[in-house]
Amino acid sequence: MTARMIPAAADPARPAATRPIAITVDGETVAGVAGQTIGGILLAAGRGSWRTTSAGGRPRGVFCGIGVCFDCIVTVNGLRDVRACRRRAAEGDVVQTQHDALPGAVS
């Protein structure tokens, strides 16, 4: 058996046509594609981190990518602590990064 290459246009498993969307991140419009997660849009826009830890202010972004670690949390449409790696972006979403120190956090 040998590998073969076929043109992308002839690939039977090719993805469906994409629909562009726009979300707002910290007041800036960021383009994405329908079906992408917020984390995916942020990574595609070149943002590797979008939150800082409450203790030490260390940068965080996607770590596990499956919703287990909670390193990628953001505020979406006013709802805090949304996992960016799990939440599919919707047209017009307003995303705010989280940088606040929690009560009792030690720097």
Image: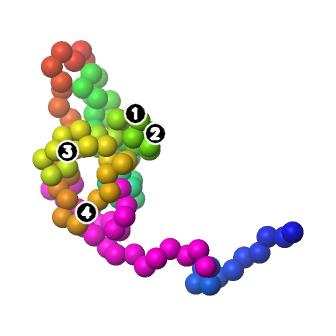
Q: Gap in Å between the C-alphas at discs 3 and 4?
A: 14 Å
Mark sitting earlier along the chain (3/2): 2
Q: Dot 2 lies on which element?
A: loop
Q: Which one is in front, 22 or 14?
A: 14
Residue corresponding to mark 2: 64
Of callouts 2 and 1, the N-terminal one: 2
Which numbered disc flags the more N-terminal residue, 1 or 3? 1
Mark 4 burial class by Cα count in 10 Å: few <14, some 14-19, many 20+: some
Say if 91 sits above or below 84 in the image: below
Check residue 75 in the rendering and tell me which mark sits there, or answer none: 3
What's drawn in magenta, residue-wise?
12-37
Residues at marks 2 and 1 touching, judged by CB atoms closer than 8 Å: yes
Q: Quadrant of the C terminus?
A: top left
Q: Position of residue 37 (x, y in %)?
A: 35, 56
Q: Which residue is mark 1?
A: 69
Inspect the image, locate mark 1, and give the three-letter code of the amino acid beneath it.
Answer: Cys
